[in-house]
Image (cartoon, rainbow, N blue to C red):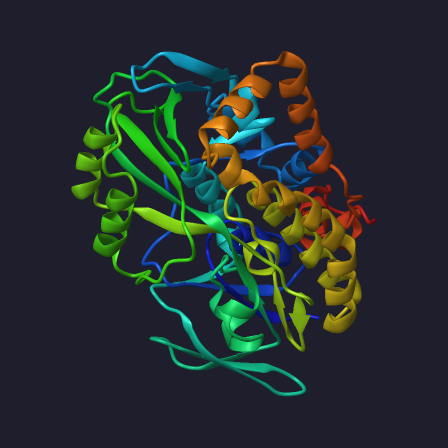
Amino acid sequence: MTQNILISGAGVAGPALAYWLARYGFKPTVVESAPALRGGGQAVDFRGEAHLTVLDRMGVLPELRRLRTGGSPIRFVDAQDRELLRLPAEFMGGDVEVLRGDLVRVVYERGLPRTEYLFGDSITSLTETPSEVRATFKNAAPRTYDLVIGADGLHSNVRSLAFGPERTYVRHLGHYAATWQLPNYLGLRHGSVGYNAPGRLASVGAGPRDPERAGAFFVFAAPELTYDRQDPEQQKRIVADAFAGLGWEVPRLLDSLRSAPELYFDSISRADVDRWSKGRTALIGDAACGATIGGMGTGTAIVAAYVLAGELARAGGDHGAAFSRYESTLRDYARGCQKGGDRTGQFLAPGTAARLRLRNELLSRPFFLNWMLRQGRKVGSTVTLPDYSALDRTEHREQRAARPAGRTP
């Protein structure tokens, strides 16, 4: 029952899905528009039993624990650098926090021996027949696959090609976020410091690896903007205009933005797709149920990859049944996680001075802070994970190879 499956996107969800599919005997191919893996220096976190269980079943949890950052404490200050609020490392970092680049590399390498990758390419069309899907590419020759999976993020190309235009599924939540790297001119140690004005957050932090480097993280409130997603210089101007006139370290941080070689800039938005599959095509991760920041998207993607691959293996070729069970298992869980992203912009950049004071006051209370930490772990665990180990062909092959000669099962 070997099935050829095309996956669009080599972020987190795509390589994780490819890893599990290969373990069950499928032949995954991952196409990625970037010329190589996109890592990024920002941190991502896992929290709750479901996330950790899947990482453990993948066999990557020990390595991620070795690579973990230890969380990222953050101080909020006023324009004179006086501390207003301090949040502990576990508030932002969950149970295990790692740099996104480390996570992507670990998951990619784990599945690489049994996965084909097409970097620097993208899907240009999908044509489905009763028995297969024909995909054309920007660079590669056309190919046919049994199934296609969109693991290509909030702005999913597969979703646009197979389900309809992005505006049908993605809703702007009123804020934008930007991150870039810069020299650690403040001499910061591990952790971040942030400054708020109504509707804006400017922060800078240093990670555990390179004391000479730091990362800026800006958030600002704005209606939905029209801009070229492929034009970083235009995006830099948008950020600079949004923070013009602010004090603290903002002018120096904006100076570093002008010469930053890479910029992440996007709206804080969420994706809501009424059905995660259509025919022989399905969506996973942010393409199906994304929330830009604060929606546990990385953990949800890891869990979804495990469930989708397991259900395809269990279905024995009936992709319709597999897609249905995959969605029914995870939809409520994913929606619960998504809700955190609805509040992210207002939490990081409250719109008025009164709301800023209220946030700082509430989070200064240990009871309220601990309650929020417990809620995060609870939401991350509200799913019952099926056990697909009996379907694992890789595990069974390794067990057979380890048996002494002449022994039978």
Q: Which percent across, then down, holds residue 116? A: 47, 62
Q: Which percent across, then down, holds residue 246? A: 26, 31
| Left or right for 76, reference 147 | left
Q: Quadrant of residue 205?
A: top left
Which residue is more in the foreground, 278 or 164? 164
Q: Which percent across, then down, holds residue 33? A: 37, 63
Residue 7 showing in the rendered view: yes
Which residue is more in the foreground, 90 or 9? 90
Q: Which percent across, then down, holds residue 161? A: 51, 76
Which residue is more in the foreground, 250 or 114? 250
Q: Is residue 139 above or below residue 105?
A: below
| Left or right for 106, reference 339 | left
Which residue is more in the foreground, 333 or 80? 80
Residue drawn where x is 39% and y is 23% of the image: 192
Q: Quadrant of residue 204?
A: top left
Q: Quadrant of residue 189?
A: top left
| Left or right for 35, reference 24 | left
Quadrant of image for the N terminus: bottom right
Q: How many marks?
A: 0
| Left or right for 190, reference 326 | left
In the image, farthest residue toward the right: 409
Residue drawn where x is 65% and y is 61% of the image: 25
Residue 68 showing in the rendered view: no
Residue drawn where x is 48% and y is 39% of the image: 103
Q: Is residue 11 above or below residue 72?
A: below
Residue drawn where x is 48% and y is 52% of the image: 112
Q: Is residue 242 above or below residue 116?
A: above
